[in-house]
Amino acid sequence: MHIPNDSSFDSPSKAPGKDPVSASAHPEGSFESVQSDGSEIISRLDDVIRLSVDRLRKAGNEEARREVEWMLESIMGIRRMQLLMHQDETVSQEAQLRLQECIERRVAREPLQYILGEAHFYGRRFSVRPGVLIPRPETELLAEWAIQALSGRKGERLLDLGTGSGCLPITVALERPGTECTGVDLSRDALEIARANARDLDAKVHFVEGDMVSTDLALQLHSTSQPHLASQQERPFDVLISNPPYIPESEREELQPEVLDHEPQMALFAGTDPLHFYRGIASSAPALLKSGGWLCVEIHSLYGNEVQELFKVAGFRDVALQQDLAGRDRLVSARMI
């Protein structure tokens, strides 16, 4: 999870609330959708887009056009190409009012993904809501690593620690059929969404409530309440992945309001020790991974060398650092002895 310091808005402000904008309220830059006699004004799609983009741009949103298109895709149930090809189509009053509500919530710095209830990850739509970390594009690199690590292998088992929305194990399960995937998270809200995403995407993934840094995690996964694991050998997993909380407390004030004011802090912050969760993973991995099994974690770009060294000292071999497309340190992988 990479949190960029440059905001898409110029002036951060606390979100005042989430109440829908009423039909009688028309902030500057909004489109009028109802005439004085109550009849509907037929609005062209291109006009609706133009006025909505203008509203967001005046609030400092540099991604206004794409965000408006994303809102309309969700509200109208159409794809972006259809939006581009039918600019002279009319937009219903109901759709206009829903769009206006979305625009005002976005101006108030609420994350677009929470407004729409969905986020895109590895070409699929995942449900998200407050209390669940929004999947980031850079985390697709971790999914790609796991998919490649499991290439040509059947019947392998993968464990994702801190699964959140379930985007990682669900993606691996769908891209590598036959891989038995398990996701662990301490948040019941996150697990509820993860299970719903697995159902919606028809992915077979096991989700378990647990603490990724608990010394009892291996016992928990081997308990009789998890029969798919209890029947396996003592160290059942071939691959372990994790995108743990890694933002140090010292960077709290650098975060965008969309992140700091809305996303779950337990999924963001590592406290005063940015390596806290990596220490826990390194400690629990020997009880979770088979001999020769692989481990890969997403990291804070400033702590790649430290995580590498931590894994080497813990006894892992083939420890490697990988950069993302922007050239930032993003993953550390290692192999169990």
Image: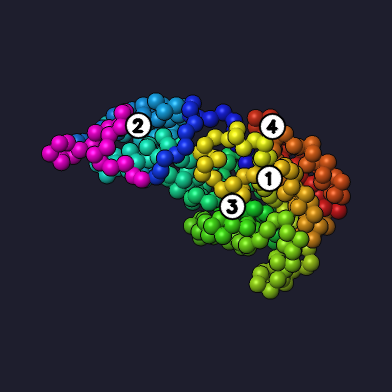
**Element marked by disc 3:** loop
Label at residue 270: 1
Residue holding disc 3: 164
Residue 248 percent coordinates (x, y): 68, 40
**Element marked by disc 1:** strand
Alpha-carbon span between mark 2 and mark 3: 32 Å
Q: Nearer the viewer, residue 109 or 337?
A: 109
Answer with mark 2 or mark 3, whichever residue precedes in sequence: 2
| Amino acid type at image mark 3 | Gly
Residue 61 occupies which quadrant of the picture?
A: top left
Residue holding disc 2: 52
Residue 212 percent coordinates (x, y): 70, 56
Answer with mark 4 or mark 1, whichever residue precedes in sequence: 1
CB within 8 Å, label 4 to label 2: no
Label at residue 110: none
Answer with mark 3 or mark 1, whichever residue precedes in sequence: 3
Residue holding disc 4: 328
Q: Residues within 10 Å of mark 4 (few under 14, many from 20)?
A: some
